Amino acid sequence: MAHQHPHDRHGGHSHSHGNHSHSHSNPSKEEIDRLEADHFYHIVSTFKQYESYSLSANNRRRKDFHRMPLPHQKLLEETVGWKSRLREVDRFISLNAEVLRDIVSDVDIYGMGDLYAPDRQQLEEDNQESSSSSDPLKQETLEPPSLFHSAPHPSHSGQSSAPKNSSTQPSEPLPPHPYDNLQQKQKKRKQKAITDFDMDKMRSTLKQFSRDWSVEGAAEREVCYKPMLDALLYHFSDVPEQDRVNIRVLVPGAGLARLAWEAAKLGFACQGNEFSHFMLLASYFVLNRTERINQHTIYPYVHSFSNAPSTSHFLRPISFPDVLPADLPENSDFSLVAGDFVEVYGVTDEDEAKERNNDDHGGYGKESQEGKWNAVLTCFFIDTAKDIIEYLNIIHRVLVPGGVWINLGPLLWHYENNNTGDLSIEITLEDVKLLSKKIGFEIYNERTIVSTYTSDGKSMLRHEYQCAFWVAKKT
């Protein structure tokens, strides 16, 4: 099911895939709507429960501090101020949570309507719990569950490396953390529990704000987005700037939509497409609910102390947006469509004709995308395919004759070795190019661009992709 949200100028790689599936072979419209609403509610709940999860993770550090020999505790505290550092982390987690709760404060933006109504009261209860569950200054001795993404490091012998000769446990039992009550309530409601996987998506969303809408992310955007936009401008260099609004550009896997916004800023009619509700909620917020530059501040690197040169490194703030999203040309045409790329853009003329002649689909409308687009920009996207040939066929089919496909990204096949039974075909870069030519593309302007993705530029660890860049013309 696709939902379209035009972003009014006056109002909007860690790729994230929806983790829900339709278990019935031919579900009814009502069943699909209910599943979609359930999944949406689960994502909103993840936003709401970020604070409890993240504070619990930080409390793990407190527990481990009290497991150290007392002389070690004293030395660590006197030298680096460990307790005050953890209180600062608590504070910044809570500030992150304020922004995340604001993002999901309006649950009607996707038109769930009455389908979502049964969960509204519970969602508000969750929100109140997550808002009042923890005063960071009162959590010095709370013991968290083991739920964070950092794996323990055993000793070389395989045994625990914790000291055995010290009495380091608190003198009184640690009280239960609010997260324990959350787990019990989830079981009682029989709702799908929020997992580490969900929270990893949540943390990635915070980093995505940095990549797409902050000053700090400008370096990555310069490496990734600028070559694509330059190629777009070059291909349509014969089109006067005032006429670019007649050139339709599609950006699948739009994430937080900065690349799509930049194309619209240049005057092109641009539509982003995104499947992840994490990304959709966040992009709607930044595009439609921000009124000034650097209106919001988050701390996306506060969750991990690893590879940190200093405390100021992971406690540094990131403000967004670095530009005003409403600052688009007067006649701009910019929208974001929610839905699976294959389901939304894979509709053919034949599919649309069948839909018009069939009254049994409960009002589901299919609109053909054949030959509707002048350009397709794929940035860190094509490796999200289960069947890459399907992606290539759709990209080719939606383009007008002579239309252009501009690609940049690696081939980190996202469904490789999945445990969900999803189809996954992993091929080489050479294979992708051969198939593209076979399908009907003329590839040129090929080169390798070294890039990071939501990278922490101040970290001691740096992952780089040798990204394949090309421009391809539909023949």
Image: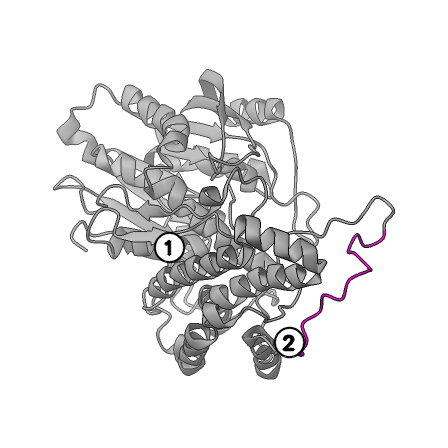
SS at mark 2 in the image: loop
- In-front residue for pair 320/357: 320
Assign the C terminus to one quadrant of the image: top left
Label 2 Cα neighbours within 10 Å, binned few <14 / some 14-19 / many ≥20:
some
Q: Residue furthest right?
A: 157
* Amino acid type, residue under disc 2 in the picture: Leu
Identify the residue under disc 1.
Answer: 282
Q: Which residues are magenta?
A: 159-174
User: Please, is residue 186 above or below residue 406 in the view?
Assistant: below
Percent position (x, y) of residue 128? 41, 78
- Give the number of the mark in front: 1 or 2: 2
Percent position (x, y) of residue 174? 64, 76
* Amino acid type, residue under disc 1 in the picture: Ala
Q: Main secondary structure of the magenta part?
A: loop
For the point 63% across and 45% down, the residue is 415
Q: CA distance from mark 1 to mark 2?
A: 36 Å
The reply to whether the magenta stretch includes residue 166 is yes
For the point 47% across and 19% down, the residue is 443
Assign the N terminus to one quadrant of the image: bottom left
User: Please, is residue 63 above or below residue 298 in the view?
Assistant: below
Identify the residue under disc 2.
Answer: 174
- In-front residue for pair 406/130: 130
